[in-house]
Amino acid sequence: MITLTDSATVKVKELLEAEGANELALRVAVRPGGCSGFSYEMFFDGDVASDDIEATFGEAVRVIVDPASAQLLEGATLDYKDGLNQAGFNITNPNATRTCGCGQSFS
C-alpha cells in the first residue's frame, strides 16, 4: 500500500475541503500505458469496492487502492512539494525499475 507524507496529507485534505467533498477518498491506481509501461492515476472517489485496500492518513484523509495496483505500489510514497524548482505530487516507487522523463510512468 502506498503511504502519504505529511505534506501530501495536508494538501489532499485542503483539496477535499476546497471541493466540499470530505466524504471522498483519494484513489491511487496504476494503469497500463505511458511511455514506460505503466502510469499513475489519482482522483477523488466515493465508490469503494469490497476488495479495495483502504488506509487513513492524518486526521481524515482516506486513500483507497485496488488490489492489482496495490501490488505495484507496495512501499511507494506519495509526496507533495510546492517550491520554485518542483511543485505538485510525486510518487517514489521502489518497485519501478525504469521511469520516463516526465515521472508519470514506470516499468
Image (spheres, grey):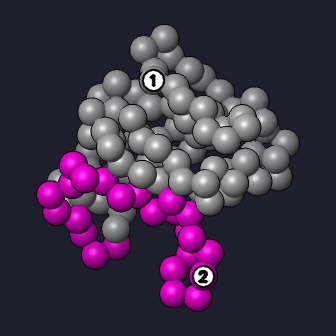
Q: Is residue 45 visible?
A: no
Question: Which residue is most to the top?
Answer: 50
Image spot of residue 62 (x, y percent): 62, 33
Residue type, numbered disc 1: Ile
Relative depth, front residue between 3 and 20? 3
Residue 83 is tagged as 2
| Residue 91 inside the magenta-drawn segment | yes
> Which quadrant: the N terminus?
top left
Image spot of residue 67 (x, y percent): 34, 24
Image spot of residue 4 (x, y percent): 52, 48
Residue for point 23% across, 65% down: 99
Q: Quadrant of residue 43?
A: top right
Which badge, 2 or 1, comes first in the chain's sequence? 1
Element assignment for label 2? loop
24 left or right, relative to 49? right
Q: Quadrant of residue 30?
A: top left
Q: CA distance from mark 2 to mark 1?
A: 32 Å
Relative depth, front residue between 107 and 4? 4
Q: Which residues are magenta?
A: 79-102
69 left or right, relative to 5? left
Residue type, numbered disc 2: Gly
Question: Which residue is most to the bottom?
Answer: 84
Q: Residues within 10 Å of mark 1 (few under 14, many from 20)?
A: some
Element assignment for label 1? strand
Residue 22 is tagged as none
Q: Is residue 104 visible?
A: yes
Image spot of residue 7 (x, y percent): 62, 60
Label 1: which residue? Answer: 53
Residue for point 32% across, 43% down: 75
